């Protein structure tokens, strides 16, 4: 199924697919970054409200934070999220693209954590993570 990215997300989701398992295999230092640097993501419809329906981009993390009944599926995922893993960020020409970890940003926000773990990768990793 082709990924159709809504206009509101064009500046937040890369225009190509990537293999998150390959991202996890990359070597990078883990650093602490202020949670506030990523809170803007929580107001974007980055999540799918139902399981196994593809990338719907139909619900914002903040909607689930304020009302878990908005998406029981995402509320459960948020509850099960482990903060010990870093979020994965690709940096291209100074712009940050979150490859993995929006649930961790949301959970850090809900727990009032001031910082979260992040691994930054530069554009040289694109050929090793890109699908297709």
Image (cartoon, grey):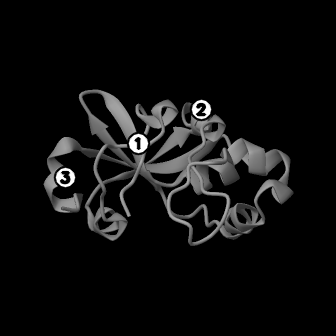
Q: Which quadrant is home to the N terminus? A: bottom left
Q: Residue 44 appears in which quarter of the rendering?
A: top right
In this figure, which residue is indicated by the disc labeled 3? Answer: 125
Distance of label 1 from label 2 (alpha carbons): 14 Å
For the residues labelled 3 and 2, say whether their Cβ atoms are less than 8 Å apart.
no
In this figure, which residue is indicated by the disc labeled 2? Answer: 40
Which of these two is toward me, 47 or 102? 47
Percent position of residue 76, x then y: 74, 68
Percent position of residue 96, x then y: 37, 35
Label 2, residues with CA under 10 Å away: few <14, some 14-19, many ≥20: few
* Residue located 65% across and 35% down the image: 43
Which of these two is toward me, 111 or 69? 69
Which of these two is toward me, 102 or 44? 44
Distance of label 3 from label 2 (alpha carbons): 25 Å
Which of disc 2 and disc 3 is earlier in sequence? 2
Q: Residue 66 appears in which quarter of the rendering?
A: top right
* Residue located 18% across and 61% down the image: 132
* Residue located 36% across and 57% down the image: 2
Mark carried by residue 13: 1
- Residue 112 visible in the snapshot: no
* Residue located 60% across and 42% down the image: 45
């Amino acid at each position: 199924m082709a990924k159709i990215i809504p206009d509101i997300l064009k500046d937040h989701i890369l225009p190509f697919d990537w293999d998150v398992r390959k991202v996890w295999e990359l070597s990078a230092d883990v650093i602490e970054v202020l949670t506030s640097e990523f809170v803007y993501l929580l107001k974007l419809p980055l999540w799918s409200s139902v399981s196994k329906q593809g990338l719907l981009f139909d619900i914002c993390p903040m909607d689930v934070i304020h009302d878990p009944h908005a998406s029981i599926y995402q509320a459960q995922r948020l509850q099960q999220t482990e903060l010990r893993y870093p979020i994965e960020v690709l940096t291209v020409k100074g712009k940050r693209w979150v490859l993995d970890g929006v649930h961790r940003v949301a959970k850090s926000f809900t727990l009032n954590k001031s910082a979260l773990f992040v691994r930054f990768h530069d554009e040289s990793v694109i050929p090793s993570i890109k699908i297709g």
